[in-house]
Image (cartoon, rainbow, N blue to C red):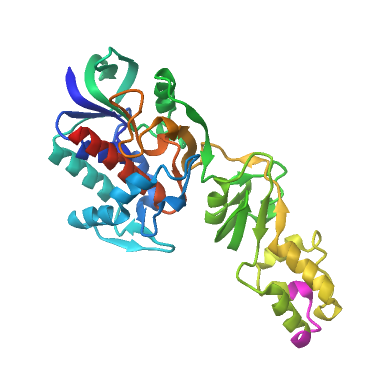
Amino acid sequence: MKVQTLVIGAGAAGMMCAAHAGAGVLVVDHARAAGEKIRISGGGRCNFTNIHTTSGNFISQNPHFAKSALSRYTQWDFIALVEAHGIRWHEKTLGQLFCDTSAKEIITLLRAEMARAGADLWLQTTVGEIRHDGTDFIVQLTRQDRHVTVITRNLVLASGGKSIPKMGATGLAYQVADQFGLPVVTPRPGLVPLKFTDDRFKPLAGVALPARVTASGTGFDEALLFTHRGLSGPAVLQASSYWQESAGISINLTPGTDLLAALQGHRQSDARKALTTILSHYLPGRLVDYLAEDFALSGTMADQSDARLAAICAALQDWQITPSGSEGYRTAEVTLGGIDTTALSSRTMAATQVPGLYFIGECVDVTGWLGGYNFQWAWSSGWAAGQAIRHG
């Protein structure tokens, strides 16, 4: 069969592209349902965008690449689409927008937009050989045990990255890029918990607090969570995207607090109280007890000199530790790296040396921070490719 555009991947980017690419679009996916990562996102409410989105919220070897798509289809455009479909939403912290009811409403929106555009959707369809005859792409598909050959002028890879393999994530886009000579920035897990092989934080499992976690010079002020395996929580997930194997991270356990001045004040007003008792006003008690030996948190407040208090504050506000690794793609929310942007047009998302071949969404070397940014990249890059195909 012949179609104008074949989109591989019925996720956020793929469905968005199909809704804007004009007539003759077929979307295929191996899953039983479209938008499975949308469905589970945001605790089932889908953090569908962030009102503070700029290109500065993304990681890429070319930090300027995302600017074009993000500026032409913005967070406000997607919010308008959400509202046009009657979906109620709310803002949580830091500009994160969620559906009031269910993430399934976003999937319904995208399915409706695809239907309005006349796009077809084939689920439980696997992709086999892909080749190019000089004019069209010839793609072998298997659907319901039936082999189908699809001939298409435009081929869009919206198959995502390697994160959450239990949901069927594969490296298909990277394989296609390699086949057609496009470079790939080595993929690795992003927005992922960090682990420590010595189980050092097992006694603290479940303890959470506001903290600033810094990796490779980039820090995030959000919640830190201790787990049986290591560290998690938004601050750690954010920093993990900047963390490099074998490198250390820095944790400020009391961000935004002039801890030294506070402790000096307590030394005047609470001289007889134990240092650990006073520190428990600023940190969870279990964490204070855990750190007491390593940080020599002993004696009363009256026992503490200015130099000693300064040393304690320095230790608590620049706690240096080295993870043994991350939890990997199994729990990673996104995949860092991907199709090298040097091989793509920032305006159309097309491969500059392979006419008709497009890469959008997570498979591209553009990765957003936690908080709705990756969905916005899906909407923006999918829209950009769709517009290019429609008007090309």
Is residue 219 visible in the rendered structure shown here? Answer: yes
Is 248 covered by the magenta stretch? no
Q: Which residue shows up at 62% across the image and 52% down it?
A: 217
Region in magenta:
268-277
Height in image: 67 above or below 95?
Answer: above
Percent coordinates x, y for residue 150 in the rendering: 23, 18
Height in image: 346 above or below 212?
Answer: above
Q: Which residue shows up at 55% across the image and 56% down it?
A: 235
Q: Quadrant of the N terminus?
A: top left
Q: Which residue shows up at 34% across the image and 57% down it?
A: 98
Height in image: 203 above or below 283?
Answer: above
Is 273 covered by the magenta stretch? yes
Height in image: 24 above or below 67?
Answer: above
- Residue pushed farthest top? 133
- Pick the residue in front: 125 or 235: 235
- Pick the residue in front: 28 or 7: 7
Is residue 161 visible in the rendered structure shown here? Answer: no
- Pick the residue in front: 259 or 228: 259
Percent coordinates x, y for residue 141 in the rendering: 28, 18
Percent coordinates x, y for residue 73 in the rendering: 28, 49
Percent coordinates x, y for residue 307 in the rendering: 83, 72
- Residue pushed farthest bottom? 269
| Count of numbered circles on the image | 0
Q: Quadrant of the C terminus?
A: top left
